[in-house]
Amino acid sequence: MTVGQIEANLVSMAELAKANKIRVVLASILPVSNYGHDRQGNPLDMRINRPPEKILELNAWIKKYAAVNRHTYLDYFLPWSIRKDCCSRISARTDFILTPRAMR
């Protein structure tokens, strides 16, 4: 799926919610890290299908779209990206789940 297709989907969902008087809350996409293995035991490189540049591009678009349309924007990416031990903790634990609660 391209960044443009994702943006179009988000616009459609936001407009549908707004038309039905539902408050729109958009959130950033979390950074990816290389963790885990495939069924053959080979390490996974999550950056191949989710390049960091595309995530940054999409997050910038979501933030701008939310501001222009007066929607709430939740930036989950920034707290993860500024944590120095983020990537080492993720790669060290194969059972680690990327959620905002995990940062506590």
Image (cartoon, rainbow, N blue to C red):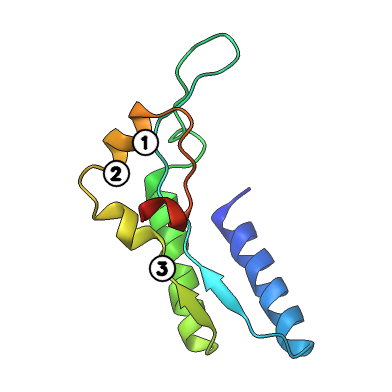
The three-letter code of the residue at mark 1 reads Ile
Residue 4 image label: none
State if disc 1 and disc 2 touch (CB < 8 Å).
yes
Which badge, 2 or 3, is on the more N-terminal residue? Answer: 3
Question: Considering the image in quadrants, where does the C terminus appear?
Answer: bottom left
Measure the C-alpha gap from mark 2 to mark 3: 16 Å
Q: Is residue 12 left or right of residue 72?
A: right
Percent of width and height locating residue 4: 58, 60
Percent of width and height locating residue 75: 41, 68
Residue for point 48% across, 52% down: 99
Measure the C-alpha gap from mark 2 to mark 1: 6 Å
In the image, residue 94 sits, relative to residue 77, either above or below, namely: above
Place residue 86 in its image quadrant: top left
Neighbours of disc 3 within 10 Å: few (<14), some (14-19), many (20+): some
Give the number of the mark in front: 1 or 3: 1
- The residue singled out by tag 2 in the image is 86
The three-letter code of the residue at mark 2 reads Cys
- The residue singled out by tag 1 in the image is 90
Helix, strand or loop status at disc 1:
helix
